[in-house]
Image (cartoon, rainbow, N blue to C red):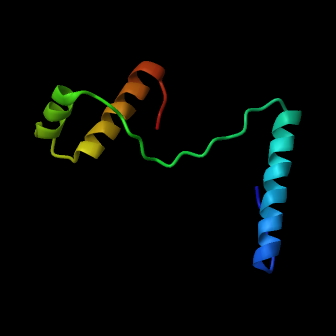
Amino acid sequence: MTYEAVTLSELEKEFRTAVDTYLRECIELDKVPDKPFKGSLNIRIGEELHRVAATVDSGMSLNAFICSAIREKLERDFNTRV
């Protein structure tokens, strides 16, 4: 999806037109529109699991440790490379 304009008001109008066109094409193709992901995730893992994960000497941050665990699970169980 691309759009361009010279003024801010034209840019907003072109953006809205591009989004409307994309959504219309998704309907025509019977496709679910892509959903943006921020890359942040709030999870609840329980106190004990949190404590152990945070205190284990993995040599990486808790965030990196969790990312690694998710990647490993996806590759092992779903044959998905990330």
Q: Residue at x 77, y 32 (%)?
A: 31
> Percent from the top left, x then y, of residue 12?
77, 67
In which quadrant is the N terminus drawn?
bottom right
> Percent from the top left, x then y, of residue 41?
41, 41
Q: Residue at x 38, y 34 (%)?
A: 71
Query: Which quadrant of the view contains residue 27?
Result: top right
Q: Which residue is drawn at 38% across and 39% down?
A: 42
Is residue 52 in view from this perspective?
A: yes
> Percent from the top left, x then y, of residue 28?
89, 35
Q: Please indicate whether residue 46 sits to the left or right of residue 52 in the image.
A: right
Q: Please indicate whether residue 14 sits to the left or right of residue 48 in the image.
A: right
> Percent from the top left, x then y, of residue 16?
80, 58
* 2 lies above or below 27: below
Q: Which residue is drawn at 67% across and 40% down?
A: 34
Which is more toward the observer, 51 or 3? Answer: 51
Is residue 3 in view from this perspective?
A: no
* 76 lies above or below 54: above
Residue at the far top in the pictured view: 77
* 2 lies above or below 32: below
Q: Please indicate whether residue 79 sits to the left or right of residue 17 in the image.
A: left
Q: Please indicate whether residue 29 sits to the left or right of residue 74 in the image.
A: right
Which is more toward the observer, 5 or 65? Answer: 5
* 49 lies above or below 65: above
